[in-house]
Amino acid sequence: MRKNSLVLAALLALLPCAPARALRVPPGANRAVIALPDGFKVTAELALTPDAQARGLMFRDTLAPGAGMLFVFGEAGPKSFWMKNTFVDLDMVFLD
């Protein structure tokens, strides 16, 4: 494992039956488009700060198809996640 490796936890909610409403991203939020190996693209809101990581997707009542959140950590190690006040179905993916 590299010294400065990134541990990424992506919360991807791919809801094909969801209404086609836009993801309600807070003003000034950073976003990235992630291309998966099969060519599918996910638009991910970046949770870069401890506050953004603690808030996560809390209080969101919708999440657009192909949208999610990417948690970026500066160093490898155990990470904890909770789903408090999260009203959308989530899938978690851990990447290194």
Image (cartoon, grey):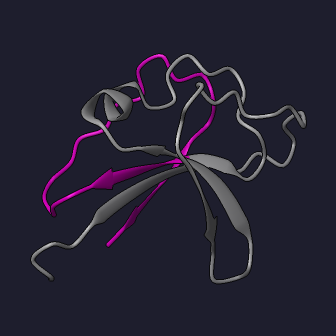
- Looking at the rendering, the stretch of residues picked out in magenta corresponds to 69-96
- Which residue is located at x 62 percent, y 22 percent? 60
Q: Does the magenta stretch include residue 86?
A: yes
**17 relative to 85 in the view: left or right:** right
Quadrant location of the N terminus in the rendered image: bottom left
Q: Position of residue 69 (x, y in %)?
A: 52, 45
In this view, 51 is above or below 35: above
- Which residue is located at x 86 percent, y 31 percent? 21
Q: Does the magenta stretch include residue 17?
A: no
In this view, 95 is above or below 25: below
**62 relative to 44 in the view: left or right:** right
In this view, 38 is above or below 35: below
Q: Quadrant of residue 48?
A: top left
The secondary structure that most of the magenta stretch takes on is: loop
Residue positioned most to the left = 3
- Which residue is located at x 90 percent, y 37 percent? 20
Q: Where is residue 68 in the image (x, y as percent from the top left)?
A: 60, 46
Q: Position of residue 89 (x, y in %)?
A: 62, 36
Quick one: 84 or 30, which is closer to the camera?
30
- Which residue is located at x 21 percent, y 48 percent? 79
Q: In which quarter of the image is residue 37?
A: bottom right
In this view, 95 is above or below 30: below
Q: Quadrant of residue 5?
A: bottom left
